[in-house]
Structures are given as C-alpha cells and as structure tokens.
Image (cartoon, rainbow, N blue to C red):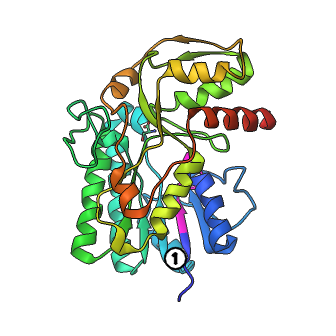
C-alpha cells in the first residue's frame, strides 16, 4: 500500500495544532506537512515539515501538493461564526473558494481522502433545538453556517459525481488548552478557564442560561481520526456527521470551575454573539455517528474542567 502523505491547511488554528500533532504520531512526522497563512504556531515550530501557505493561492497550494507527494488534505482554514458576521462576503469567499479549490484538486490529483470540518452552525433558529437530529430543518442564520451547509452539499456532490472521498463532522464548540480558539461564538468556554486561573473572575459574552453543545479537544481529535480511518462503506452519510459529547450553560461551567476555585465569580454582558448562540441547538443527537462508525465521547463537563485547570495551571 502506498504511504499516505498528509497536508494540513490551517494547521495553526485551534483544531489544526492538535490534529497535526496527533496525525504525526500516527503516520510519522515527515508524512504530515503542516501549513498555515501565519508563521508556525510555537507547538509546531521546528517539529516537522511546515509551509507558510495561503489557501487562496491555488498555484502555491497545487505546488505544495505536488512537491510533497500529498495524498490526503485536511482543509481547516476558515473564518468562524463571530468573525464571519463582521465581514460576511469575506467569510463566504474564504470558506467557499478554499473548499471548491481543494475539492477540484482532490479529483485532479486523485487524492485518496479529504477532511473538511462542518459545524453545529449549519443549524438555525427554525431547527428543533433539543437533541437536534442529523436530518432536520436546516436554515442557518450566519454566513459561517451558510458556508458550512453549502460546503457539506458540495462535498456530497463531489462524492456522488466523482467518487471523491470527502469526510466531515459537525463539531460542537471545542474546548482546548494547547491551542487557542479564534472568532467563534463558543470561545467563551475556553476564555473562562484562562480568566478563572488568572483573575478568579470572568465576564461572559453570553447570558447565563445559554445552553450549547460542546466537546473537549481530545474527543474531537479522536473523532476526526476515527472517522478518517473508518472503512468507506460504513459511512452512510456523505453530509457531515452530527457529533456530540456534552451540553452546558455559562452558569453550569462556572459552577464546575468553582469546585476547584471556590472564589471564582462570573458576570454577564451579552453582545452580538448572543443572537448567534440563540439560533443554534442546545444539544445534538449523534446516533448516526455512533451507529455508522462507533463514535463515543469520553469527556463530560466535570472531567474536562479538571483536565483544563490542571494543564492550564501547569502552563502558567
Ligand atoms: N465554535 C464555532 C463557532 O463558535 C462553531 O463551529 O463559530
């Protein structure tokens, strides 16, 4: 069997940093080329092949694929929900053009697999909000959500029309300590741990009872790798899979932090992100992922809080 060579685009982002490290452990450092428009993230610097690459430059991207004998691409570069609302046209352009270009490259260069993340943001205010099913009303309210839903349809189309093996997950809010989130509505659930350790207080940009689906990064990375390694014939859906681990509100995450830092206090100053959150599910039904490729999360709120505070505390 031919050795797979992976290109990660957007390797400096919240998912990219940890996914690069995990894939390098699995496939060998030299077989995973990390790339980002930015300089290498400190955790990736001098630790394996790295390219400073703008995915909006098709010539440079194709050259990277050919020069490195790439067989698989993980396309993670995107503008997220909150950033996207500030410049909707730019978000649409970056999120869609990059995907269409990589899908075409996948067909042209006969790539074996492509990974592209989707999000709970595909759902909107008309979607049932509790235990949101895989297939339901999908009318996204943000440009980020529109681009993710359109992207899912394109991925499915390329699979049906050209047999391209594109795989995708609808990630919930992701919480991590190694890498930083950027521009998302769920980012409060990372900031809160940093502020709890530094200042024992946090002002949340969402209201206290805003429930959102969330997941610890360890679970998200494992889910991504398990989906990518699953035999193709198990994947009944070629849209992105719903993926779920836990659901909590700012009030509940604050209470779980207080178990470790009793003096921690939280107050609330909801901003424009409240409206985005109000249009998203409170919890997700991921039966299809559990059935098709055996998905099972490991971290709940309590375990995640303990792990986050320990690791961020050590990091200082
Ligand atoms: N975490 C993302 C956001 O808040 C959702 O995919 O934009």
Query: Range of the magenta residues?
Result: 7-14
Residue depicted at 53% across the width and 87% down the height: 2
Q: Quadrant of ligand 1?
A: top left
Residue 122 x %, y %: 30, 43
Residue 13 covered by magenta stretch: yes
Camera-side residue: 257 or 169? 257
**Image quadrant occupied by the C terminus:** top right
Q: Quadrant of residue 113?
A: bottom left
Residue 233 in view of the camera: yes
Residue 196 covered by magenta stretch: no
Camera-side residue: 73 or 56? 73
Residue 131 x %, y %: 32, 37
Q: Which residue is denoted by mark 1 in the rendering?
A: 70
Residue 13 in view of the camera: no
275 to the left or right of 171:
left
Residue 166 x %, y %: 36, 67
Mark 1 Cβ and ligand 1 under 8 Å apart: no
245 to the left or right of 52:
left
């Amino acid at each position: 069997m031919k050795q797979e060579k992976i290109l990660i685009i957007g390797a400096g982002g919240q998912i990219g940093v940890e996914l690069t490290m995990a894939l390098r452990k699995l496939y060998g450092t030299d077989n995973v080329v990390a790339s980002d428009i930015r300089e290498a993230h400190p955790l990736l610097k001098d630790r394996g092949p790295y390219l400073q690459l703008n995915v909006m430059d098709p010539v440079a991207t194709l050259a990277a694929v050919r020069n490195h004998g790439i067989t698989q691409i993980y396309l993670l570069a995107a503008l997220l929900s909150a950033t996207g609302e500030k410049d909707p046209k730019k978000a649409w352009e970056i999120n869609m053009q990059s995907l269409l270009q990589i899908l075409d490259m996948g067909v042209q260069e006969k790539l074996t697999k492509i990974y592209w993340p989707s999000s709970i943001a595909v759902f909107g205010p008309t979607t049932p909000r509790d235990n949101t099913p895989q297939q339901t009303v999908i009318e996204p309210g943000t440009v980020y959500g529109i681009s993710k839903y359109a992207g899912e349809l394109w991925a499915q189309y390329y699979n049906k029309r050209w047999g391209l093996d594109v795989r995708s997950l609808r990630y919930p809010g992701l919480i991590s300590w190694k890498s930083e989130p950027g521009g998302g509505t769920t980012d409060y659930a990372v900031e809160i741990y940093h502020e709890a350790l530094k200042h024992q207080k946090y002002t949340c940009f969402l209201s206290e009872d805003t429930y959102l689906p969330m997941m610890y990064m360890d679970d998200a990375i494992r889910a991504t790798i398990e989906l990518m390694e699953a035999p193709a014939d198990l994947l009944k859906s070629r849209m992105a899979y719903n993926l779920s681990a836990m659901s909590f509100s700012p009030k509940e995450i604050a209470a779980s932090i207080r178990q470790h830092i009793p003096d921690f206090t939280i107050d609330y100053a909801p901003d424009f992100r409240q409206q985005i959150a109000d249009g998203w599910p409170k919890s997700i039904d991921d039966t299809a992922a559990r059935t098709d490729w055996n998905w099972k999360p490991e971290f709940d709120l309590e375990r995640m809080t303990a792990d986050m505070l320990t690791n961020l505390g050590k990091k200082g």
